[in-house]
Amino acid sequence: MIRKCLLFCFLFLKISFAQFNETGLGIAINSVYTTSASIFLSPNSSDPEIRNRAFIIEHIFNPAIDIRYKLSGDLIIGLNADFMKTTAPGRNLTVLSEGNTLTIEVEDGFFMIPVEFSLYYLIPFSTESFKFLMGGGCGIYFGEHIRKFGNAEVKNIEKKFAYGIHVSVSMDYLIKDNISLRTELKFRDPQFSVKSAYTKKDVKYNGQNVKVVQDSFDSKINVDGSTFILGIVFHL
């Protein structure tokens, strides 16, 4: 009985591995590089200069999964999800220490999960081995602001998911009928706002006691850099 089940599974998998030119499912495991993101630490300030001042984080790497299904002809639909988490040091926080005002270095960053729905078009000059696609669609973006310094704890008390659009171009190189390498360039502009609070105002920082001036703070995260993707695709 076990042999028959194994044989059936083997035959099913062998039949269901379809070539790119046939209708089928493609699942990609991707490595994603984003050039930069901007964190606006005073997005609600009445002063335009302070409101538009951003803390920039560059060279962001993260994993992602991409699922595409060929409908018919040259049209393909897709669903993509990233797991993006990054921080960088910056002198972004003003505190009180022994009656004096200090600007200290903290680790500022964000955590974001983009979920994107896309429609792709298989470009006619594609060959048997090289498949070129243009695509675009919409996305939903969930995120949090991350801040670390001393023994402080920060929690997000208000966060709103955001909507956005994206466009991309990609190329698949078929190594085998059921495996390909993918490169992709994507342009997107996810942006979301967060309100965060400190769980305590007295913080131990570099061996000294400091007091946080604000109980809570607003921030806006905008992942506005170009996105480069490299992945391996399994066609089922």
Image: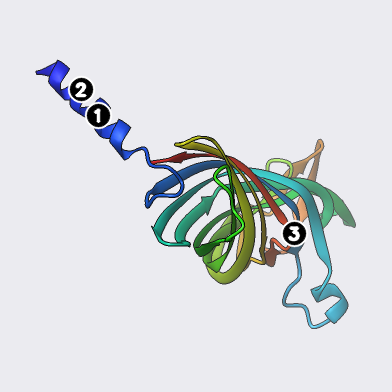
Tell me: residue 182, above or below residue 207: below
Given residues 101 and 2, the one toward you in this image is 2
| Mark carried by residue 7 | 2
Q: Name which residue type carries label 1.
A: Leu
Q: Is residue 182 left or right of residue 220?
A: left
| Mark carried by residue 75 | none
Query: Which residue matches tag 3?
Result: 225
Check disc 1 and report its element: helix, strand or loop. helix
Check disc 3 and report its element: helix, strand or loop. loop
Q: CA distance from mark 2 to mark 3?
A: 49 Å
* Residue at (62, 57) in percent of width and height: 125
Residue 131 horizontal/vertical position (percent): 57, 50
Q: CA distance from mark 1 to mark 3?
A: 45 Å
Whichever of callouts 2 and 3 sits on the residue coming sooner in the sequence is: 2
Check disc 2 and report its element: helix, strand or loop. helix
Whether residue 174 appears in this view of the structure is yes
Given residues 8 and 164, the one toward you in this image is 8
Residue 117 horizontal/vertical position (percent): 48, 63
Quadrant of res 230:
top right
Quadrant of res 72:
bottom left
Q: CA distance from mark 2 to mark 1?
A: 6 Å
Query: Which residue matches tag 1?
Result: 11
Residue 79 horizontal/vertical position (percent): 46, 57
